[in-house]
Image: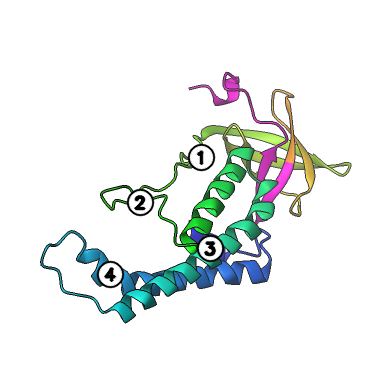
């Protein structure tokens, strides 16, 4: 999913420099993993081959720099995603930033007494369930109306096919076949398809998202 997002950074409105920085992190992560793989594979082996101190220092420096780059990217991504996603994802950014700062400082708060790494629990790890809607609707924005077709939704957003031309952060009101109005923001738009994030999440007992 991240690779797709990086290839479509213009469609989702990411600044060019930020998209390039995140892409570099993924390339550097592959190199850092390859460098540390012998150390990882020998963990727990009583007669494991000795790794020179200089090599260990090199691995440490590479991973600390990677943690620094990741922390900077998380902090820059947070305001870019805040208006698209619910507040739980902002909580994720804060937890990850704290974890990466500790890694940069060489702290071992995520390592237990047996040397096992326990990653911090994130407020939001589970994908929000989506529900089929499949009905014609209208999208009102800046005094004009566009015909659209609502495909699916979650409690936070709606995916539509639409005739109109929208920009990121356009304020819209989606009017369903029943006449119900769902105000929100355009969070992505490409080739006649759009994502609308609701101004307020739907309640858990809403009929639109009932099983």
x, y percent for residue 49 = 16, 73
**Separation (CA) of disc 2 from disc 3:** 19 Å
Q: Residue furthest left?
A: 47
Q: Which mark is residue 37?
A: 4
Q: In front of the other: label 1 or label 3?
A: 3
Q: Is residue 172 visible?
A: yes
How packed mark 1 is, by other alpha carbons closer than 10 Å (few <14, some 14-19, many 20 or more), is some
Q: Residue furthest right?
A: 143
How packed mark 4 is, by other alpha carbons closer than 10 Å (few <14, some 14-19, many 20 or more), is few
How packed mark 2 is, by other alpha carbons closer than 10 Å (few <14, some 14-19, many 20 or more), is few
Residue indicated by mark 1: 124
Vertical order, 166 against 176 (above or below)? below
Kindly state the secondary structure of the residue where label 4 is placed: helix
**Separation (CA) of disc 4 from disc 3:** 20 Å
**Separation (CA) of disc 4 from disc 2:** 18 Å
**Separation (CA) of disc 2 from disc 1:** 22 Å
């Amino acid at each position: 999913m991240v690779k797709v997002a990086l290839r479509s950074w213009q469609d989702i409105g990411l600044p060019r420099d930020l998209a390039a920085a995140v892409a570099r992190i993924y390339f550097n992560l592959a190199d850092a993993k390859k460098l540390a793989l012998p150390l990882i594979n020998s963990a727990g082996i009583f007669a494991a081959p000795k790794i020179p101190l200089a090599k260990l220092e090199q691995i440490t420096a590479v991973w600390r720099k990677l943690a620094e780059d990741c922390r900077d990217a998380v902090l820059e991504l947070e305001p870019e995603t805040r208006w698209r996603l619910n507040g739980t994802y902002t909580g994720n950014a804060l937890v990850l930033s704290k974890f990466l700062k500790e890694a940069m400082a060489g702290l071992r708060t995520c390592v237990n007494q047996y040397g096992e790494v326990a990653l911090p629990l994130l407020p939001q790890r589970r994908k929000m369930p989506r529900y089929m809607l499949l009905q014609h609707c209208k999208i009102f924005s800046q005094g004009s109306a566009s015909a659209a077709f609502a495909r699916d939704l979650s409690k936070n957003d709606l995916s539509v096919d639409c005739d109109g031309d929208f920009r990121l952060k356009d304020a819209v009101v989606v009017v369903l076949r029943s006449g119900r109005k769902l105000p929100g923001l355009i969070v992505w738009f490409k080739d006649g398809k759009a994502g609308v994030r609701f101004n307020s999440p739907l309640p858990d007992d809403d009929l639109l998202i009932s099983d």
